[in-house]
Image (cartoon, rainbow, N blue to C red):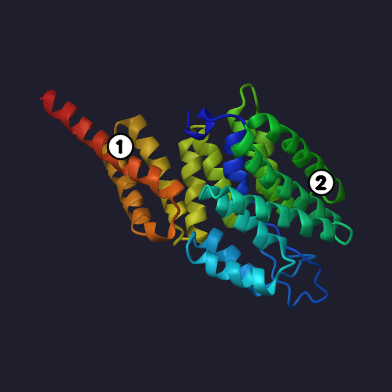
Amino acid sequence: MSKISKLTFLKPILLIISLTFIPVFGISNSPVLAKDPFRTKQSRDIGKYTETAFETLFFEGDYKTVNKYLSLAESEEADEPLAHAIKASLAYTEEDWDTLKTYALKTLTTAQKLQPQDPVRGNLYLAVGHFLDGTYIYQKEGPIGAIQKLQLVFKYLDAAEDSDPNDPELNLIKGYMDLLLAVNLPFSSPEQAIERFQTYAAPNYLVERGLAVAYRDLKQYDKALQFANKALEIAPDNPEHIYLKGQIVRQMGKKKNSIPLLEEALDHFSQAASKSAQLPRFVTKPLEREIRQTKEKIDEIKAESASSL
């Protein structure tokens, strides 16, 4: 069982989904000017700084440089909920609860303004805002208070789905939640969640990454590796993608007691670690642990082999 599945029901949702709440704002009158990472049709236009922040974080996996663009976005694109949602999510990873609360409320405020002109995205942002606010309540008050917020998240996600069930952005965010629940809840069947996520969600590099994680947690490592490779083909310099592939290969190596596979995993971990300056602690800490554990497993297999001679 993966580390995530051993946590409480609510906390893994707060961790994973907060980092995938990546919506965009506004209705563009000019398709030529629209810069929408989700849609090729009926695209929305977002600010240039917010778009750069989005790509810096999710395509490049750079948690440090993104703050420069988020500051510019907050100054020049103050009505952009994406920037507020990312700021809140990053605050969560840094355990900066006051900042999380501030930007969760800003996300809710801008979502409320957006709702009349774009009900799909307005309701989606209301779900995002309540979700982020729920992370604050969870940390300060525990799971009981956060459950009420979670109910609001599902309420507004349902409202967004009523407006456009095939919207790529909606299916990305909701899809991550559906996959997490389907993979970790007993007696659940993840196939339907996987199919819908793969069919309707975007952008593709986050879809491939999500599917790799899902199949990893289902212990279907061959499929997990397939999607991890696809994510790397699209975004080869993202250290989180490199790390994810290393995790999958490590599990395959442990299962087969294979030193070559474990050494391959170690190589991927080392590549990811070489970019640790751009990664947050919640990524680098388990990465360091997995490097150590992989080396220990290799030594263990070598010792067993030597003793059998």
Mark drawn on residue 161: 2
Marks 2 and 1 close (CB-CB < 8 Å): no
The local secondary structure at tag 1 comes to helix
The local secondary structure at tag 2 comes to helix
The CA span between labels 2 and 1 is: 43 Å
228 or 106: nearer the viewer: 106
Q: Position of residue 146 (x, y in %)?
A: 69, 35
Mark drawn on residue 293: 1
Residue 202 in view of the camera: no
The residue at the point 45 percent across, 46 percent down is: 282
Q: Position of residue 101 (x, y in %)?
A: 65, 50
In this view, which residue lies farthest toward the left? 309
21 or 90: nearer the viewer: 90
State whether residue 123 is above or below residue 41: above
Residue 155 in view of the camera: yes
58 or 281: nearer the viewer: 281
